[in-house]
Image: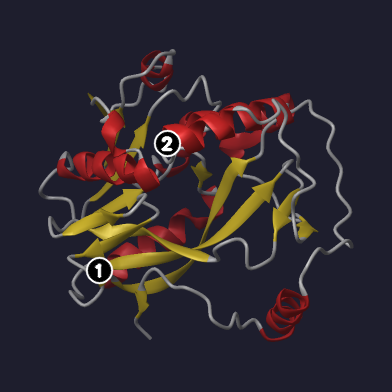
């Protein structure tokens, strides 16, 4: 059995993506690591080369500026990266530039890949998610945040990235997946208020037409972190590869997790989920095999 990792990245330095940590977090699990770097205006190439691991294979691409509606370019680039994976790989492990896997889950990921490698019904493995917000001390715990997503897929040329590459499809069909006991830590919403807004404005260029983009760019230069509905204090540990980055954090943001900002409907759904673990009407980007 062979596991190939893959990711895409562009302007990681400009947008302060923890892409080095993302890649390093799955290197112990994979046999090769495909990194497809877009046409950057910063030092992303040098940053990725600095990891200097023999498993890493760096490739280059040019992102099509005409594919910015709905983040379509992200799926196109992700598919390009998938095509670079060695044909003899059984599984492909996708990691985005702001996602990191804790080392405590490496064994569970490997075990899942081994368990289902010969079960052709299983087209992917489903991970749980923690979405950090504002600082490294708080996670979103409402329906605003997706709870699960597929990050390991079978190395099948018929499987393609879907929409903005958050998930995958086989043709128009959702993948049949098995859940494993492993989390992805999502750090995309942890930056200083100034850096967060800078990243938001850069990322919006992949989504909006000129008129909408102009309005977005006119927003203040500082992100307002008070725009949350519900948070809870994080009580676990962060991945070891994140420790240096966490120690560098120097923006003072504090939250009161007791404060909830829900409509009556969302409040009822929130407390129902807390009591039962069930999330009614939740969109699932996959089909779970029991």
Q: Position of residue 173 (x, y in %)?
A: 23, 72
Picture residue at 68% right of the left edge, 86% below the top:
276
In this view of the protein, which residue sits in the foreground, 230 or 28? 230
Asked if residue 129 lies left or right of residue 54, the reply is right
Of residues 91 and 220, which is closer to you in this image? 220
Around disc 1, counting alpha carbons within 10 Å, would you say few (fewer than 14), some (14 to 19), or many (20 or more)?
many
Residue 72, picture quadrant: top left
Name the quadrant of the C terminus.
bottom left
Which numbered tag is attached to residue 81? none
Q: Which residue is at a point 29% across and 65% down the rendered structure image? A: 114
Quadrant where the image shows the N terminus: bottom left
Looking at the image, residue 223 sits to the left or right of residue 62; the answer is right
Neighbor class of circle 2 (other Cα within 10 Å; few <14, some 14-19, many 20+) is many
Mark 2 or mark 1: which comes first in sequence? 2
Disc 1, SS? loop
Instruction: Give the alpha-carbon distance from disc 2 to disc 1, as whole Å.
Output: 23 Å
- Name the residue located 47 percent from the left edge and 25 percent from the top edge: 12
Residue 133 in percent (x, y) is at 69, 47
Against 111, is 9 above or below?
above
Disc 2 element: helix
Which residue is at 33% across, 54% downward?
Answer: 163
Task: Residue under label 2, please give it.
Answer: 23
Give percent across and percent down for residue 92: 27, 52
* Tag 1 residue: 123
């Amino acid at each position: 059995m062979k596991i190939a990792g893959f990711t895409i990245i562009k302007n990681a330095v400009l947008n302060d993506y923890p892409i080095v940590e993302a890649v390093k977090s799955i290197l112990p699990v994979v046999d090769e690591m495909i990194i497809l770097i877009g046409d950057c205006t910063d030092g992303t190439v040098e940053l990725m080369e600095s990891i200097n691991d023999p498993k890493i294979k760096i490739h280059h691409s040019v992102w099509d500026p005409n594919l910015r509606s709905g983040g379509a370019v992200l799926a196109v680039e992700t598919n390009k990266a998938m095509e670079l994976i060695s044909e003899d790989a059984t599984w492909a492990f996708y990691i985005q530039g702001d996602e990191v896997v804790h080392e405590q889950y490496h064994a569970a990921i490997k075990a899942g890949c081994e368990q289902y490698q010969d079960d052709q019904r299983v087209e992917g493995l489903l991970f749980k998610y923690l979405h950090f917000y504002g600082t490294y001390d708080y996670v979103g715990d409402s329906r605003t945040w997706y709870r699960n997503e597929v990050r390991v897929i079978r190395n099948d040329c018929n499987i393609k990235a879907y929409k903005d590459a958050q998930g995958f499809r086989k043709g128009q069909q959702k993948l049949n997946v098995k859940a494993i006991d492993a989390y992805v830590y999502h750090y995309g919403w942890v930056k200083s208020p100034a850096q967060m807004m800078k990243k938001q404005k850069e990322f919006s260029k992949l989504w909006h037409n000129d008129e909408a983009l102009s309005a977005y760019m006119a927003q203040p230069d500082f992100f307002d972190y008070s725009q949350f509905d519900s948070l809870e204090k994080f009580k676990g540990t962060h991945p070891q590869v994140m420790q240096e980055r966490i120690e560098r954090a120097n923006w003072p943001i504090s939250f009161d997790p007791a404060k909830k900002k829900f409509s009556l409907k969302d409040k009822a759904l929130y407390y129902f989920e807390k009591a039962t673990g069930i999330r009614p009407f939740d969109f699932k980007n996959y089909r779970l095999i029991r």
